[in-house]
Amino acid sequence: MKTVYQLFVNGIPKAQPRPRMTVNGHVYNPSSADAWKEEVKAAFISCRRPMITEPIRLKVYFFMPVPKGMKIVCKDGHYMPHIKKPDADNLLKAVMDALTEVGVWKDDALAFWTEAVKFYAANENYHEKTGAQIIIETGF
């Protein structure tokens, strides 16, 4: 197994919204995740490698903002799981769409194994940055 990319993308992760339809029947994608997707694309453009055309394993660890007034209670320096909206699968979809758009891989169907984990961006010892740790592995 070979790690092709391992990057941390700063920003506030946003979920890929579902397509919407106007009263006239026009279908469109809301722009709520566009800024986050641009952050992901910019991070990968800066270290571009040849396009991946083989099966990949994708791991994404999302670090979400801590709401004001929330106390982080975790033991042993671990992160507290984020169990609110947005859903992990919709966060992952936004990242995968951005990586397809920027040409990291030929198609996101190459991802035969995905892991998406959400945590609050802090543990009991210190505050962390919001964003996502993205790891792409090949060689199976």
Image: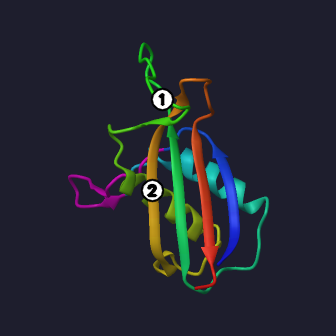
Work out which quarter of the rendered image holds the C terminus and state it.
bottom right
Which stretch is magenta? Answer: 14-28
- Between 35 and 119, the one lying in front of the other is 119
Q: Is residue 16 visible?
A: no
Picture coordinates of residue 48, whole percent (x, y): 77, 68
Work out which quarter of the rendered image holds the N terminus and state it.
bottom right
- Between 2 and 32, the one lying in front of the other is 2
Picture coordinates of residue 77, whole percent (x, y): 56, 32
The amino acid type of the residue labelled 2 equals: Ala
Task: Residue at the far top: name it.
Answer: 69
Location of mark 1 (residue) = 75
Identified at 46% across, 28% down, the residue is 74
- Between 6 and 102, the one lying in front of the other is 6
Task: Specify whether residue 112 is painted magenta.
Answer: no
Picture coordinates of residue 72, whole percent (x, y): 46, 22
Mark positioned earlier in the residue sequence (2 or 1): 1
* Dominant secondary structure (helix, strand or loop) of the stretch shown in magenta: loop
Q: How is the image coloured?
A: rainbow
Check the image and report above or below for 101 versus 89.
below
Q: Residue 116: which disc?
A: 2
Q: Which element is circle 2 on?
A: strand
Identified at 60% across, 23% down, the residue is 125
Determine whether, in the image, residue 126 is placed left or right of residue 44.
left
Q: Residue 113: which disc?
A: none
Other-residue count near label 2 (Cα within 10 Å), few / some / many at <14 / 14–19 / ≥20? some
